[in-house]
Image (tube, coloured by chain):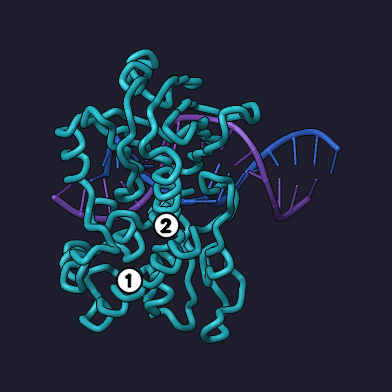
Chain colours: A cyan, B purple, C blue
Amino acid sequence: MPELPEAETIARGLQAAIAGRRIRRVRVHRQEAVEPMSPAAFRCALTGRRVESVARRAKWIAAILDDGTRWVTQLRMTGRFTWSPPSALRAAPHLSVSLLLYGPQGGGVLRFYDVRRFGRMWILDPAAWSELDARLGVEPLSKDFTRRALAGLLDGSGAPLRNVLLDQERVAGLGNIYANEACYLARLDPRRPANSLDESEVARLHRAIRTVLRSAVERRGTSLSDYRDVLGGAGRFQADLKVYGRSGAVCPRCGGVVARTVLAGRSAFFCPGCQR
DNA sequence: GCGTAGACTTGAGGCG
DNA sequence: CTTCCTCAAGTCTACG
């Protein structure tokens, strides 16, 4: 599911829902979700803590707690949060972790679901968080992500462009949907060796990455199947997809036919007519 | 060091 | 209708 725009939408939703509230109760329904911590240690680390704020880094969700630790979630493919009033509803299938939170304006239940069970949560002290943060590449919507910075990242690799854009140690937050869409918008063949781009092509790609991500954040992400925001709302960027998941469709720019190929074991979509 | 294949996991959709 | 096969938003590990 979630790439940068989906994680951003979820983080903003969590900030609105739980920032300032205190965690009263924690239940771990699937212990793999918190490994290598034990469920008991995880519950103990969170219970009684106040959530100061919630933000996104790359595709990770990080809540800062009042003891200085970070409660970090990696959503992977199908991880999903829901926020609901404490009274309401029973849990649905695939529930991994649930928390009860209260604040001055009342409380609610935060639930973490994950059909495919890849999603994980950790409690990190400041040093462990710094280590994680340092391992991740530049935020593509930050001002550190310059054309020059992108050129430097691409120069280091002869692998296909699409694969390099997926490398979280280079650019942090792009996943398969937006990497493919950015290549399309930049009119670049995703199979091109990353280090073969000239200056104007790098400039086009830089602009395309930012345009695609900003637009997808504004649309609250792409809902192809599982992804929903914390209140259950779908994203709307799926209507704007030009190539991802659209092999055989007509290219809206040149009238060619969108093709699918496999790069490093994952689908790549592009229009052979106008991506060079 | 670099790049790719495989593994993890469950469910949906296509095909016959 | 059932069965089998392929594929899926991510990332970590193991090889060549």
Residue A202 at x, y percent in the picture? 25, 76
Instruction: Determine which residue is flagged by label 2.
Output: A5
Q: Work out which residue is located at the far top of the displayed protein and give it.
A: A40
Q: Are marks 1 and 2 on the same chain?
A: yes
Q: Residues within 10 Å of mark 1 (few under 14, many from 20)?
A: some
**Secondary structure of residue under mark 1:** loop
- Label pair 1/2, CB-CB below 8 angstroms: no
Q: Residue at x 47, y 78 (%)?
A: A272
Residue A96 at x, y percent in the picture? 50, 27
Instruction: Determine which residue is flagged by label 1.
Output: A192
Identify residue type, mark 2.
Pro
Q: Residue at x 48, y 39 (%)?
A: A79
Residue A70 at x, y percent in the picture? 27, 33
Residue A181 at x, y percent in the picture? 44, 68
Q: Residue at x 22, y 57 (%)?
A: A138
Identify residue type, mark 1.
Arg
Residue A269, relative to residue A14: is it above or below? below
Q: Residue at x 55, y 45 (%)?
A: A231
Q: Which chain hosts label 2?
A: A
